[in-house]
Every structure is written in structure tokens, then in C-alpha cells.
Image (spheres, grey):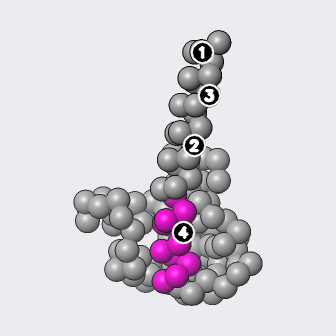
Amino acid sequence: MKLVRLGAVAGVVVLCAAAIALPTYTKVVTVHYKVKKGAAIEKAGCALCHLSKTKLKEYNPYGADLKKVMEAAKTKTLTPDLLKKIDTLDSDKDGVKNGEELTAGTLPGDPKSK
Ligand SMILES: [Ca+2]
């Protein structure tokens, strides 16, 4: 019984750590691009960069490009300067540049959103 309880506590701690770490990234994006309430970016949350809200180990094309920039900078802290480095790319190849999509509130990693 104690082992089950310990496992449950460990699971909650892991989930809380993930929940604390990830919204920081989305906050940097929403503040930098002045994302309006209700925009696709706000609704997407972690899926702005990840394949979905539940597939956090996989990245969509925008997340993959952002990951490359962060790895090159050897940092896990997302800054506006790092975001700007991929503003002129069109990660999802839908004809709209990442920076334009983020300013408009659409998803730069989803070609169906532009
Ligand atoms: Ca695009």
C-alpha cells in the first residue's frame, strides 16, 4: 500500500514539474508576439511546438526548428532573440513565414493554420 502511495506521489511530482516548465515557453511566445486571447496559439498551448498536447517528446516542424536554434545556443531558456532567429523561416511550408503567423496568432507548425 505504501509503495502505491509513493508511486502516486512521484507521478504527481513529475506532472507538476512538467506543468511548471512548459507554460514558461508559451508565455515567452504570447508576450513577444502580443498574442490575443482566444487565438489559435493560445488554444494550442504546448502543441505550438509539440506534435500535440500529449505527445510532448515529439515536435512539429516549428518546434523542430526552434529546438535546433536552442540547441545551437546551448540553452533551455527560450528568449525573444531565439524566437526571432526563425521568424523568417516557413517551418510548416504553408507559404506564411513563422513571424507573420505568430503575429497573426496562427500556428507556424501546422500548415492547416495560416
Ligand atoms: Ca507557415
Q: What element carries label 3?
A: helix
| Label 4, ligand 1: CB separation under 8 Å | no
How would you rate the neighbour count of disc 3 (Cα within 10 Å): few for under 14, some for 14-19, many for 20 or more? Answer: few
Q: Name the residue under label 1.
A: 2
Q: Earlier in the sequence, mark 2 or mark 4?
A: 2
Q: Does the magenta stretch include residue 54?
A: no
Q: Mark 2 points at which residue?
A: 15
Which region of the structure is painted magenta? 22-32
Q: Which of marks 3 and 2 is nearer the N terminus?
A: 3
At x 56%, y 52%, the residue is 19
Give coordinates of residue 58: x percent, y percent.
53, 49
Q: Name the residue under label 4.
A: 26
Q: What element carries label 4?
A: helix
Give coordinates of residue 67: x percent, y percent.
40, 60
Of residues 6 and 81, which is closer to you in this image? 6
At x 65%, y 12%, the residue is 1
Q: Mark 3 points at which residue?
A: 8
At x 34%, y 80%, the residue is 81
Residue 45, placed above or below residue 55: below
* Measured Cα–Cα span from mark 3 to mark 1: 10 Å
